[in-house]
């Protein structure tokens, strides 16, 4: 994880200039009843229409076979930010003779992930169910004097 955090900004800065993505470390909140929907995309453009998510990995992926957990993460971030697209970038890591991780490529690979309203609806349903169940649990504990 340290390798990924250390290279995150470098990867974002290596994305094609046409996307005008800047590194991001803001926690972004939803609005209204979805204010607890939170995301921290790794990069944003100025009008938030495009976000970036970057990963470091021990194995390469095909651009059309990004692991499902990362596609879900991206769709959630698109939901929270209101963006329509995400530049998803990944950098292969290798282990040096000294045992440290180092980049295995000169630059990251990337692909564009478009907003998927069906997946976002599914993610929102799960999230809303979770927060309702959690709030019910807290309320029940308070009523029972367990807190």
Image (cartoon, helix red, strand yellow):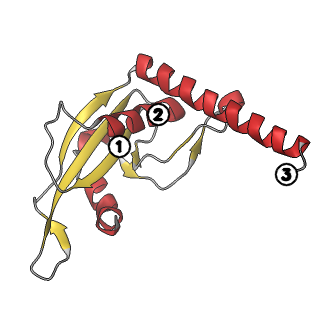
Asked if residue 129 shows in the view, the reply is yes
Q: Where is residue 35 in the image (x, y as percent from the top left)?
A: 67, 36
Question: Relative to residue 132, is residue 56 drawn left or right?
Answer: left
From the viewer's side, name the closer residue of 132 and 87. Answer: 132
Q: In whole angstroms, how far apart are the C-alphas of marks 3 and 2?
A: 33 Å
Q: Which mark is residue 146?
A: 3
Q: Name the residue under label 1.
A: 52
Residue at the spot 39% in from the left edge and 48% down from the top edge: 43
Q: Position of residue 19 (x, y in %)?
A: 29, 39
The spot of residue 44 in percent (x, y) is 42, 44
**CA separation in Å, label 3 and label 1:** 43 Å
Query: Can residue 82 be seen at all in this image of the molecule?
Result: no
Occupied quadrant, residue 23: bottom left
The kind of secondary structure element at disc 3 is loop
- Residues under numbered marks 3 and 2 in contact, where contact means CB atoms less than 8 Å apart: no
Mark 1, Cα crowd under 10 Å, few <14 / some 14-19 / many 20+, is: many
Residue 88 placement (x, y as % from top left): 28, 41
Considering the numbered disc 1 on the image, is that residue within a helix, a strand or a loop?
strand
Q: Which residue occupies 40% across, 42% down?
A: 45
N-term mark: 2 or 1: 1
Q: Which dot, 3 or 2, sits closer to the camera?
A: 3
Q: How far apart are marks 2 and 1 (CA)?
A: 12 Å
Report whether 113 appears left or right of 121.
left
């Amino acid at each position: 994880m340290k390798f990924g955090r250390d290279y995150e900004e470098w990867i974002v800065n290596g994305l094609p200039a046409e996307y005008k993505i800047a590194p991001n470390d803001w926690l972004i909140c939803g609005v209204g009843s979805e204010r607890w929907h939170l995301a921290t995309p790794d990069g944003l453009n100025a009008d938030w229409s495009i976000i970036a998510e970057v990963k470091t990995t021990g194995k390469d992926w095909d651009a059309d076979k990004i692991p499902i957990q990362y596609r879900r993460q991206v769709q959630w971030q698109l939901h929270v930010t209101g963006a329509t697209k995400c530049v998803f970038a990944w950098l292969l890591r290798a282990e040096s003779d000294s045992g440290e991780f180092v980049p295995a490529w000169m630059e990251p690979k990337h692909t564009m992930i478009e907003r998927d309203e069906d997946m976002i609806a599914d993610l929102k349903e799960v999230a809303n169910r979770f927060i309702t169940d959690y709030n019910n649990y807290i309320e029940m504990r308070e009523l029972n004097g367990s807190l």
